Image (tube, rainbow, N blue to C red):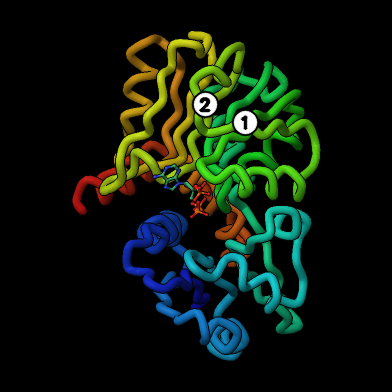
């Protein structure tokens, strides 16, 4: 049996076992995907013991994504660029490879939900400057976004991200977020605002062109106040669940040897688990 799992602390909230379990069953693979509660101080030991325990690899979630960079033996280009590892693969020789599939997940979510949309269509506005923002900005730069307006409550975090990634990133003050929407082709929320238990994102959309695509990477709830407001005024919207589903595909393929699809049935199963909690 091939083993994989997700390491985090805490980790019980993770939907990854449901997601990978769905694919294992669908493809009739003799494998398992487990919750792996690992304290920050035990990360290195836990990663180093994967091979001996028959694991093909694991996902990493809070708080391990950055720390794992210093542990793994090989780091792929995107993980190095985004400064975070979300997928670990145990290579045949027992060494550990760290990858980051969040940028892929962001891109594939937009691509499958809005096939005609292109990053080159115009300026993108990205709210937030945490780990998720790095993956989003990296994907947009790679896909040819002509300008990225990066807006974060703590301006210094946005400035550090802009320096780390380079390219046409303009750092804009949080207080000027509404005006920064003028002539944008994309608006992405990567902050935790709008998530269950968090305050909504306070943002007037009046300056945003009606054709601009609006994406929230928050997926609980599926329809955030930002997405409702954008939908009401006629903007195309994409929710954040697809990013979670798509980022898992390359990891599953690397561990279990089959590239799985994001189907309506999978979306339905994971969406139902969001409502259940
Ligand atoms: P993730 O890995 O999901 O991106 P993170 O690294 O903790 O999570 O980043 C959270 C983001 O949400 C940050 O951009 C944070 O802004 P700061 O850099 O100023 O902390 C943003 N955020 C969280 N709570 C916020 C709030 N109440 N108002 C505005 N931004 C907020």
Q: Give the x, y percent position of residue 65.
A: 57, 65
Query: Does label 1 point to a residue whose CB lies under 8 Å from ligand 1?
Result: no
Frontmost residue, 120 versus 163: 163
Q: Report which residue position mark 1 lands on.
A: 172
Residue depicted at x 61% and y 72%: 67
Helix, strand or loop at disc 1? strand
176 relative to 108, above or below: above
What number is the disc on residue 207? none
Side of 168 relative to 249 (left or right):
right
Side of 153 relative to 199 (left or right):
right
Q: Are circles 2 and 1 on residues that touch, CB within 8 Å? A: yes
Q: Give the x, y percent position of residue 62.
A: 47, 65
Q: Give the x, y percent position of residue 215.
A: 48, 30
Q: Earlier in the sequence, mark 2 or mark 1?
A: 1
Point out the residue furthest to the left here: 276
Q: Report which residue position mark 2 lands on.
A: 177
Q: Give the x, y percent position of residue 228.
A: 32, 23
Residue depicted at x 58% and y 56%: 258
Frontmost residue, 19 versus 243: 243
């Amino acid at each position: 049996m091939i083993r994989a799992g997700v390491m985090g602390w805490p980790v019980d909230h993770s939907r990854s076992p449901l997601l990978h379990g769905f694919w294992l069953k669908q493809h009739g693979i003799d494998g398992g995907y487990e919750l792996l509660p690992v304290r920050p101080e035990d990360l290195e030991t836990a990663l180093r013991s994967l091979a001996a325990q028959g694991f093909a690899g694991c996902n990493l979630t809070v708080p391990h994504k950055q720390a794992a960079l210093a542990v793994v033996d090989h780091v792929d280009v995107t993980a190095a660029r985004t400064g975070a590892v979300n997928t670990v693969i145990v290579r045949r020789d027992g060494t550990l490879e760290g990858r980051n599939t969040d940028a892929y997940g962001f891109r594939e979510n937009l691509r499958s939900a809005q096939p005609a949309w292109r990053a080159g269509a115009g300026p993108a506005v990205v709210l937030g400057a945490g780990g998720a923002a790095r993956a989003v900005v990296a994907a947009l730069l790679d896909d040819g976004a002509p300008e990225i307006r990066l807006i974060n409550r703590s301006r210094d975090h946005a400035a550090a991200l802009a320096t780390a990634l380079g390219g046409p990133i303009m750092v804009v003050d949080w207080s000027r977020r509404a005006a920064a929407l003028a002539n944008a082709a994309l608006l992405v929320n990567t902050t935790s605002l709008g998530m269950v238990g968090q305050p909504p994102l306070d943002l007037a959309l009046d300056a945003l062109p009606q054709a601009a695509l609006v994406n929230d990477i928050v997926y609980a709830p599926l329809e955030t106040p930002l997405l409702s407001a954008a939908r009401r005024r006629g903007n195309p919207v994409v929710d954040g669940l697809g990013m979670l589903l798509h980022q898992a595909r390359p990891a599953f393929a690397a561990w279990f040897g089959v590239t799985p699809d994001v189907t309506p049935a999978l979306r339905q199963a994971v969406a139902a688990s969001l409502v259940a909690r």
